Amino acid sequence: MKQTVEEAAKEYAELIVKPQEMYLSFEGVYSLKEDLFNSFSAGAEWQAKQSPWISVKERLPEPNKLVLCRMVSNGAIVSGYIVVSSGRSPYVATDGGFEFEDWNDYECDMWMPIPSFDEILEANRDVLERIKEKGD
């Protein structure tokens, strides 16, 4: 089961700070634990908003792993397998009958894993809950 941001932040803050520790600032006495919790949460939320695309220069997917790929020639997104051959840029091998007009060797610059249904559901849980609340 995935850990929520709040659970992870609480666990992190409890590992770092003893419950009774406080610190003094210009505005008064603050709980370091509370500040660590808020900072951890803000960082996790920021990270969640970052692009899921991975540059082929940064790293490649596992061999024979079906992924989403962004084509250099026209920015199209296709599913396929990234192939690396000496002397050329990484390119995409697509399934059997797939072709498009501007294929230009299917050169790929970015890729991302294809999310599972459960990952899509989890990523959109808040939206689904709001829809459910409106229907009640």
Image (tube, rainbow, N blue to C red):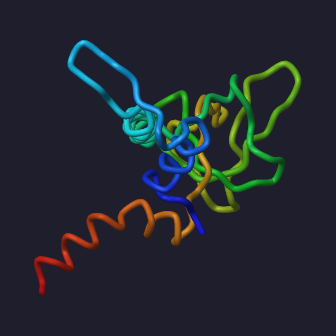
Q: Residue at x 28, y 72 (%)?
A: 128
Look at the picture and state if 35 lies above or below 95. Answer: above
| On-image quarter of the C terminus | bottom left
Give the side of residue 68 with respect to residue 25, left or right: right
Residue 91, position as x, y percentages in the image: 70, 35
Look at the picture and state if 109 lies above or below 19. Answer: above
Q: Quadrant of residue 60?
A: top right
Q: Quadrant of residue 56?
A: top right
Name the residue at the top extreme. Answer: 26
Residue 99, position as x, y percentages in the image: 58, 51
Q: Residue at x 49, y 45 (%)?
A: 77
Q: Residue at x 48, y 46 (%)?
A: 9
Q: Residue at x 69, y 25 (%)?
A: 58
Name the residue at the right extreme. Answer: 86
Residue 23, position as x, y percentages in the image: 39, 23
Q: Nearer the viewer, residue 76 or 57?
A: 57
| On-image quarter of the N terminus | bottom right
Name the residue at the front extreme. Answer: 20
How many numbered discs, if any?
A: 0
Q: Quadrant of residue 25?
A: top left
Residue 15, position as x, y percentages in the image: 61, 42
